[in-house]
Image (tube, rainbow, N blue to C red):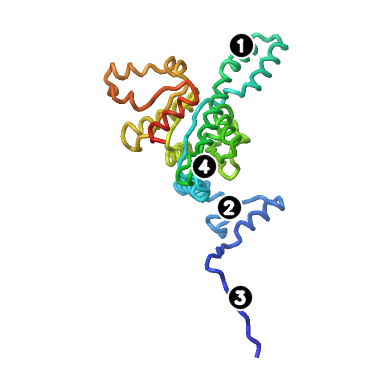
Amino acid sequence: MNHVKNTPQHLTERRLADAWAELQNYADQGNPLEADAYRLAFADPEFLLRRETRGIRFQLEMLKPDLDQAEQGIENTVVVFGSARFPAPEDAKNSLYEAQLSGDASALALAHRLVRNAHYYDQARLFARLVAGYSMHRRPEERLFIATGGGPGIMEAANRGAHEMGAPSVGLNIALPHEQKHNPYVTPTLSFKFHYFALRKMHFMMRAKALVAFPGGFGTLDELFEVITLVQTRKAKPVPIVLYGTEYWKRLLNIDILVEEGAIAAEDLKLFQYADEPEAAWAVIKNFYGL
């Protein structure tokens, strides 16, 4: 009598239907992917992209980066915000050289501005190196990791500084109509892409132990005031908030007016500090936590 030998199953084995293989076959064969009532719900792109399933997409966009970071030991971050338009000094110099050759007055003015602002790139890079250098010899639970929006400019500079020290760093990028690609210095397994700004900003705060805002535009202001508001209203625990570049920020924001008009309390001015050197910004964080 023949006996069928059963192969034992591992307790940790994960078994899923081959829905994704089916989708891959469609792509490989160049077949159009049409809505299919019989397709498994989680493998049906048309279903997942419906307006009614937006809540599910919120959950997925919340869960995926959270699980991936936790699995890689990313628990404490120093978030660096700043302009995507401030280039590396070497790129700024190349732009100036090309503008001088072209003789275009508007291009030359832009190039001079890029050169003027490029020093912020270098300073963000140096600041990130300080954070990464501190964390290299700490226990895993004591390490601080650089996190940025994953794009160019100041974001690239901070990821670059961590990369140069051999430290992993996080990039929380956003899908935009004019595609913003991740910079090459983000750790590939920590490079995430978001559709929803709200979920992206939530992820910035979930692990943030400090925020350093370099000069930037609307996006930087949006992210900065989100954090200040959360801390002011005690929806988030106090964290050191550093405005890097005193002259820039005081030209842009006359926050004293808010106190004079009674829109905020005088003590709210203590929610943030200014710094003009990478070491000074890092000192604010070290003093806050007694590092």
Cα–Cα span, label 4 and label 2: 53 Å
At 45% across and 46% down in the image, what residue appears?
A: 141
Q: Can you give x and y, in whole percent of width and height, for residue 227 in the image?
A: 40, 32
Q: Can you give x and y, in whole percent of width and height, for residue 165 in the image?
A: 59, 36
Q: From the image, tell me which residue sits under label 1.
A: 109
At 53% across and 27% down in the image, what residue appears?
A: 124
Q: Amino acid at mark 2?
A: Ala
Q: From the image, tell me which residue sits under label 2.
A: 35
Mark 4 neighbour class, 10 Å CA radius: few under 14, some 14 to 19, many 20 or more: few
Cα–Cα span, label 1 and label 2: 53 Å
Task: Tell me which numbered mark, 4 or 1, is placed earlier along the sequence.
Answer: 1
Q: From the image, tell me which residue sits under label 4.
A: 137
Cα–Cα span, label 1 and label 3: 73 Å
Instruction: Please name which of the two marks, 3 or 4, marks the residue nearer to the observer.
Output: 4
Q: Secondary structure at mark 4?
A: loop
The C terminus - image quarter: top left
Task: Tell me which numbered mark, 4 or 2, is placed earlier along the sequence.
Answer: 2
Q: Residue reaching furthest bottom?
A: 1
Instruction: Please name which of the two marks, 4 or 1, marks the residue nearer to the observer.
Output: 4
Q: Amino acid at mark 3?
A: Thr
Task: Tell me which numbered mark, 1 or 2, is placed earlier along the sequence.
Answer: 2
Q: Can you give x and y, in whole percent of width and height, for residue 12 in the image?
A: 53, 65
Q: Amino acid at mark 1?
A: Ala
Cα–Cα span, label 4 and label 1: 45 Å
Q: Secondary structure at mark 3?
A: loop
Badge number at residue 79: none
Cα–Cα span, label 3 and label 2: 37 Å
The N terminus - image quarter: bottom right
**Quick check: marks 1 and 3 in contact, CB under 8 Å?**
no
Q: Secondary structure at mark 2?
A: loop
Q: Is residue 93 above or below residue 25?
A: above
